[in-house]
Image: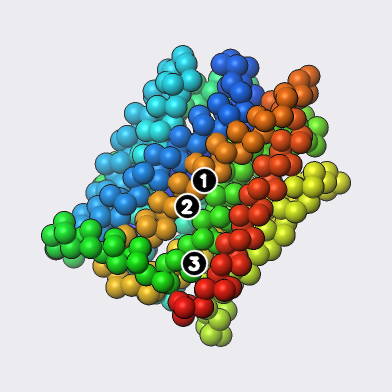
Amino acid sequence: MSITRIFVPFALGYFLSYLVRVVNAVIAPDLVAELGLTAADLGLLTSANFLAFAAAQLPLGILLDRYGPRRTESVLLLFAALGAFLFATATSAPGLITGRALIGLGTSACLMAAFKAYVLWLPSERIPLVNGLQMAAGGLGAVVGTVPVEMAMTVTDWRGLFFVFGGLALMFSAIIFLVVPRRHGSETIPGTMTDQISGIVEVFTSPQFWRIAPMTIASQSMFLGTQSLWSGPWMSDVAGLGRDTIAHHLLWIAIAMVAGFLGMGAIAERLGRLGVKTIHVAFTGILVFAIVQLPMALQWTGAVLPMWMMFGFFGTAGILSYAALPKFFPPEMTGRVITGLNVFTFGGAFAAQWGMGVIINLWPNAGGQVGSGYAPEGYQAAFAVMLALQVAGLAWFMVFRRAKV
């Protein structure tokens, strides 16, 4: 069986998922100007994607384990298409929020379905690297969501972009359903619904899960919430950069993120052969990611691009947890393990993205600046709060020795 038939369709889906996730970092000024959004409004609007994404994770784990990744993702992408079309035609904030929520629901399987498929089809020692390649496909979506989107905005507007996104969701749904092979002629895994739910309980009562989860959730919440929205406004309101410069900076951040996904996966695979556990590689990467954020919280603007590129590279370290955690559970539970972690990760991303907006909004609007015009002091407070949460998660991993990982 060619790995291309498995990897490429799921990579296309995750490419689109990341593209629609990060695009608001570029189009935020247009949304603010057209709808008069506050920082809290903008955070809620964008994070609605994460909230729906998180809410879908537990049932998604059951669907993946019971019906397989091919059918699950191809159906859900239809909801993403509907959400994109609603977003493109909305005339008010509630309509935009509804569209973003449907997009979040529709793309909720794009990564987890791929991870599930790779566990079914690939040897375990290759999974960290292939997971990294899958994440790199998402990183390419983030790349397209920067300068290419800014260029596209010269020939269309944000509504036209979302019409295109809806069409891509329909096309990728068909590709996944028609190209990805069935598993041994049937994708349905036997077992009652009670059995499926009991598996979720087993995951959530596992000490291994609760040692790894806090640092992963804190790190990924900051990374997802900031990279998909607040990175652009920070550059305009704190560093004073113009829109074109910000778009190019976001492009390089996304490139660094792709390099991080590929590099972290390759490093974990190589060190694994030497006996170094994947979760320990993840811990080290997450620690460096936290250190990188310290100058951001202090509003140091002496080297904006290198600092944010390091943010993009080391922000990918948390994804290694998704390769490490399933090793403590039977293969047939993989879907529930990774979506169990994901429900907290994306719930945290929703809280982080919206919460950062709420904190930023506590300071008076600076006004007259390029971009959103929010006060720099608000960003300083928001980044400091998120950094403190990550430090707490790392400390918990170090002191919680009851789980042998």
Q: In this view, does 123 lie above or below 17?
A: below
State the image coordinates of residue 377 (x, y, percent, origin top left). 76, 36
Question: How far is the residue under mark 1 from the one under mark 2?
Answer: 6 Å
Q: Which image quarter: residue 280?
A: bottom right
Residue denoted by label 1: 349
Q: Residue at x 80, y 32 (%)?
A: 240
- The residue under the point 26% across, 64% down is 199
Quarter of the image where one finds residue 27 = top right
Badge 3 or badge 1: first in the primary sequence: 3
Res 219 visible: yes
Q: Position of residue 146 (x, y in %)?
A: 62, 37
User: In the picture shown, does residue 366 fall above or below 266?
Assistant: above
Q: Name the residue under label 2.
A: 345
> Which kind of residue does numbered mark 2 sit on?
Thr
Q: Which amino acid does label 1 sit on?
A: Ala
At x 75%, y 47%, the residue is: 297
Using the image as rendered, state which of residue 299 and residue 151 is in the foreground: 299
| Residue at the farthest bottom position | 274
Q: In percent of the image, x 51 and y 56: which residue is there?
A: 217
Q: Is mark 2 on a helix, strand or loop?
A: helix
Q: Residue 212 carries which label?
A: 3
Q: Callout 1: helix, strand or loop? A: helix
